[in-house]
Image (cartoon, rainbow, N blue to C red):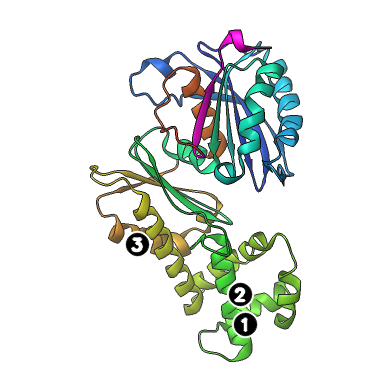
Amino acid sequence: MTPPPDRGWVLGVDSGGSGLRVALGAVADHAAGDGDGDGDRVRALESVAFEEPVPTGPGGIDAEHLLARLVPAAEGLLARAGADRLAAVAVGAAGMATLGDELRAGLPGALRRSLGVDRLALAADAVTAYAGALGQRPGAVVAAGTGLIALGTDLSGWRRADGWGHLLGDCGSGAWIGRAGLEAALRAHDGRRGGSAALLARVEALLGPPATLPGRLYPRTDRPAVLASFAPEVARCGAGGDAVSAAILARAAAHIADAAAAVCPPGRDEPEVALTGGLFLMGDPLLVPLRAELAERLPYARTVAASGGPLDGALAVAAALATDTLRLPREPGMLETTPLEPTDRT
């Protein structure tokens, strides 16, 4: 049995395109008493992961489907820790701003009845990514993988840039880089300017005849992920000296820096900028031009390593909510909290 925490047990939930993850955390006394208001000093104990993402329906994100996984997972985590009840839950979900109506309507009452939760935070996954990367400090975070979104705050409100999906935006993301790389390969196939023989060779080796790409790609519902799967090939070719690939990565870096600059809180001395997400695992082929772009666009800012990921951020938000130290801005569609009085339980 895990020793009971000083300030209670909290649950963090991360729901996105790669699946659903649920983690139990223990909050220590100093999370509320050190005066900095971070509220993110929570010890993660154990987590449960589901590879299939929570689906969306006519009402948006399917709350019933999420609850069918979340409640048994939470009960199992609590039982294994020897815990009695939860002080707070934070759910970070992709699409919360536009597809979260069903969650907002159904989750508070359902979690109150099933888990006895008095406090609940519903957040966009970009907010939990921010909290995981920077805690509750002012600054900017770029979260990038298949897609890309930048989020910044001075703790009075949120500033967002991009995150518009692979057809309208997500500029500099994995899907953006992969699509640009495939286009350069097809240009080489056609004999047009701007083509890359190196990328064409990678297409032929991995995906087959270039002429078959449209028929194989366009009907798929997971087009962004398929496009993003080619982004590492662009990075490899760029690192190998292919000028077209290097130029694609340089343009991606400029787009990422643009997004960071758009959300970085103005008028602050040396605000922090953190990069989080799988895209940045590409390493130097992307990071070298990105550091140069950030230095030019945000010379007054300080780039820092992300402290953690979205699941860490969900736990941090839950801990702050449990200890009355939540300083991140509440804003519809971004971060909403529901304090439930014990007398309201049914």
Q: Residue furthest top?
A: 343
Q: Confirm or deny contact between disc 1 and disc 2 (CB under 8 A).
A: yes
Q: Position of residue 177 (x, y in %)?
A: 54, 67
| Residue 330 seen in the current view | yes
Real-space Cα distance between discs 1 and 2? 6 Å
Circle 2 SS class: helix
Task: Say what amino acid the circle numbered 3 marks.
Answer: Glu
Indicate yes or no whether the magenta region holds residue 335.
yes
Circle 3 SS class: helix
Mark 1 highlights which residue?
186
Image quarter of residue 222: bottom right
Q: Confirm or deny contact between disc 2 and disc 3 (CB under 8 A).
A: no
| Residue 308 seen in the current view | no
Q: Quadrant of the N terminus?
A: top right
The residue stretch that appears in magenta: 333-346
Mark 3 highlights which residue?
293
Mark 2 highlights which residue?
182
On screen, residue 339 above or below 271 = above
Q: Position of residue 12 (x, y in %)?
A: 59, 29
Q: Any mark on residue 85, and which?
A: none
Real-space Cα distance between discs 1 and 3? 28 Å
